[in-house]
Amino acid sequence: MIWATVVMALREIRRNTLRSVLTTLGIVIGVASVIAMVTLGRGATAKITQEISGMGTNLLIVAPGSDRRGPTSASATALKLDDATAIQRDVQAVAEVAPTASRGVLAVFGNKNWNTVANGSTNEYFSVRRFVLAEGELFSEAQLKGSLACVLGATVRKELFGALDPIGASIRVGSVACLVTGVLVAKGPSTFGQDQDDFIVMPLLAFQRRISGNTDVGTVFVSAKSDQLTIKAKQQIELLMRERRHIAEGQANDFTVQDMQEISSMLGRITGSLTALLGAIAGVSLLVGGIGIMNIMLVSVTERTREIGIRLSIGARGKEVLLQFLIEAVTLSILGGAIGVAVGLLASFLGARALNLPFAVVPEIIGVAFAFSATVGVAFGFFPARKASRMNPIEALRHE
Amino acid sequence: MSSAPGAVPLVELRAVSRIYGRADSEVRALDSASCIIEDGEFVAVTGASGSGKSTCLNVLGCLDVPSAGEYLFRGVNVGALSADQLALLRRNYLGFVFQGFNLLGRTSALENVELPLVYRRLGSKERRLLALQALEEVGLRDRALHTPAELSGGQQQRVAIARAMVSKPQMLLADEPTGNLDSAKKADIMQLLVRLNQTRQLTIVMVTHEHDIAQYATRIIVFTDGRITDDRKTGR
């Protein structure tokens, strides 16, 4: 009986091809957008994770400030070079330490100028942050003691020098002249479109003396000896810093030590909730699609009143008429769901290629979207079907 | 329905009334109508429009139930049955033919004839076989795959008769079966009904307002204002 009813429903759907297509369009769009949103969201998350591990999973970032979630406390004491030296000296799990101070500057060469960021640091900066030298050299021992030398990020080099050779040239950084010793290999933009190559590195001492005018160190980049030692290094640094900053037991830290996994999971949460939000919005369109099905089924029930009368007169029971219309609605929504899955996968495949994201199919969401579309069919098909099943056969037969 | 045919009359109406509307504005479509129809009869129910003949057919066809009195189908009181039981009664024992043919549009003659068998849960091969036999009997086997729109009025009514016959009912109920046809087609359809009545001993109750059509029946019941005012054999 069910099978015969399904066959009947399919025939009815084929008989009204245009109407059926329009009816299912809502479901198709709903399912497709849910799948596209979630698939692209997962792709973005995967790319971010990949990018962060490219920065080094053993990277730790020490910065002043009481709570990483709130705004940085103005009263938090800045880090100093001594802190970095202490970390290097006292924490066994640490491989390299790069104390870094930063400030926005205007860099000028010839008639070109470029707004960028100057980082005062040490040669460890490059290895800890995984930057590779493209040309020239890192800072010499002598330069590290306070000479005005600099290494350029790929973007700065391009903007100031174009095709010219920058090595050995002198640029003006802020108000001081500075010798270019090396140029870095580009990392390219991040997922969020941030240029990772737009900066200048100078020896920390020179930076403090000539650019920032104080002895503060904004951030200390630390690399653990291995990925496994990252958490241990983090704990040890926290202990050491609490001691150095005289924080009493039970008091909160006035600094933060972030590891990449933490940043990765934080970004994962952001993209995750973004994905959920987009998915929910897409889910609303699925709901609207369901209402579309109900609408058409109601029209169809009225239009086919006579047919219902015929069926009742030849001995169909109310529940059999109900089943027929319900199966028709569910068949429509499942067809819509199947087409929606195909369209959604195609759209997210093309979208992933256009946005340069990995194509990360989430099998569960296909199942969920499909099941949801069937549920929509039952939920919104039931009311019209019940209306059909409760018709009086005499009146239904008389209906023009 | 366990009784053997003949022992209990097929149909017995005992003072059946069908009343529409409320007490102050009630309409008595049927007013204490009583009659017995035996197996194998061909009954024409006639009367002016509004005389209650269609209501009588609806009651006989278990599409409607009496407001008062009793309708016994093979001894079973139809008034006591639920809507689902009435549907099963129609499915297993009754066949309908309507004035407007009432075939499903854009559906082949074969599929139309198969429809009652779908509800009887027959397999598709058996359905096809029985439906083709029924179409053969009304002379439309070669039109099996045509849709109603591709058939003439007379042909459509033959398909409708095949549909009513395919489940081998005990009684065929026809509501103005020739009302939408020209006179040549009318005779065709009536001869088909007479043949079914004679060769299969099929009981037929037909509503008609046309005197000459009523003459094909073996018995004529005349309704006036909801009451049976005449009930006679035609002598055919």
Image (cartoon, helix red, strand yellow):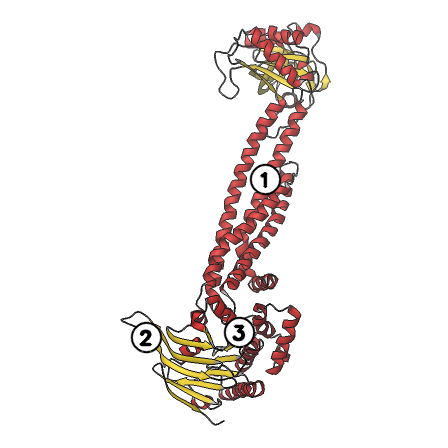
Residue B216 seen in the figure: yes
Q: Quadrant of residue B60?
A: bottom left
Residue A400 in sight:
no
Q: Which of B156 and B82 is in front in this view?
A: B82
B69 relative to B83 in the view: left or right: left
Which residue occupies the extreme bottom position in the image?
Answer: B235
In the figure, A372 relative to B148: above or below?
Answer: above
> With B49 as the anchor, is A113 left or right in this view?
right
Q: Which mark is residue B103?
A: 3
Pick whichever, A88 or A350, lies toward us: A88
Q: For the residue carrying disc 3, how many other residues have a C-alpha within 10 Å: few (<14), some (14-19), or many (20+)?
A: many
Task: Quote the CA–CA distance across marks 2 and 3.
Answer: 31 Å
To the question of a shared chain for discs 3 and 1, the answer is no
* Left or right: A286 in relation to A48: left
Task: Inspect the image, locate mark 3, and give the three-letter code of the amino acid beneath it.
Answer: Leu
Secondary element type, mark 3: loop
Residues tagged 3 and 1 counted as in contact (Cβ below 8 A): no
Disc 2 designates what residue? B27
Q: Name the residue under label 1.
A: A38
**C-alpha gap between disc 1 and disc 2:** 64 Å
Amino acid at dot 1:
Val
Q: Residue furthest left?
A: B24
> Relative to B9, is A212 above or below?
above
Which residue is drawn at the image coordinates 49% and 81% (left, top)?
A: B8
Q: Which of B86 and A376 is in front in this view?
A: B86
Q: Is residue B194 above or below residue B98?
A: below
Q: Where is residue A374 in the image (x, y as percent from the top left)?
A: 56, 51
Badge 2 element: strand
**Chain ID of residue with mark 2:** B
In the picture, the disc for residue B95 is none
Q: Is mark 1 on a helix, strand or loop?
A: helix
> At 48% from the left edge and 11% from the top edge, which residue is drawn?
A75
